[in-house]
Image (cartoon, rainbow, N blue to C red):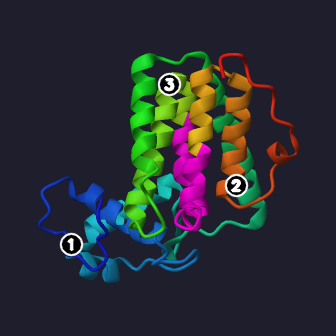
Amino acid sequence: MKAMTGKKIGAVHAPLNKVVADAIRERILAGEFVPGERLAEERLSEELGVSRMPVREALRALAAEGIVTLEPRRGASVTSYTPQQVQELVEVRATLESLNAKLAARRKDPAQIAELQRVLAAGTKINEKTDLATIQDNNNRFHEALEAIGANSVLSSIVRSLRDRTALIFARQSRTRVRENWKEHAEIVKAVIAGDADLAALLAGRHVYNAAQMPGAADDEPAPKRSRAA
């Protein structure tokens, strides 16, 4: 999705609430609005060329994702996490992404593996000059493709919700770490293809900590030996 900063979207032929939510989300994740900054409905409606009602509903949807915080009398603002909250969110996401990678290595399906490799090939062409929306879209595609291979609907639902809540945490580093992220993605794919569940889990958990640029328990764990298939 191309950046919508300053673009009038009132005439876009799509569910308006979703279009507005996508536009606001993109601007938040691009850093145009900083954590804690108030999101005035009137200002947003003017900038996006829509009435205040779809803006209000979009902000409610973004609040459900965890990107926006709604407070009585103060209205909407970009969610701001404390260092402790960041630590807790990253710990949980690392654990769940590890489990998903482990399941993917155990349940690998040839067609889904081929799709994951296509996503990886496209992602490795991205660099720091790529627009942020494309960087984030390709990153999401990778994790969704890996999630599909894991094939656990309960885990998928939880992880997707958590990805929404942690989007702000990872957006800050998504451009500066773009090459490192895709190198780490490639290592995870190798482990999944080799059927090395323990290694895939370790690499996926470590990747989450690296992407958040914070130390994690996975950094202190020795990498398990690769299986013969590797």
* Observer-nearest of 139 and 162: 139
Distance between mark 2 and mark 3 Cα atoms:
23 Å
Q: Relative to 21, does residue 102 appear above or below in the rendering?
A: above
Q: Is residue 87 magenta?
A: no
Q: Is residue 170 magenta?
A: yes
Amino acid type at image mark 2: Asn
Asked if residue 2 lies left or right of residue 162, the reply is left
**Horizontal and vertical percent position of residue 83:** 76, 66
Residue occupied by mark 1: 50
**Horizontal and vertical percent position of residue 135:** 44, 58
What span is colored magenta in the figure?
A: 158-184
Within-10-Å neighbours for mark 1: few <14, some 14–19, many 20+: some
Q: Is residue 41 visible?
A: yes
Q: Is residue 104 visible?
A: no
Asked if residue 2 lies left or right of residue 40, the reply is left
Q: Earlier in the sequence, mark 1 or mark 2?
A: 1
Q: Relative to 103, does residue 88 appear above or below in the rendering?
A: below
Asked if residue 73 lies left or right of residue 42, the reply is right
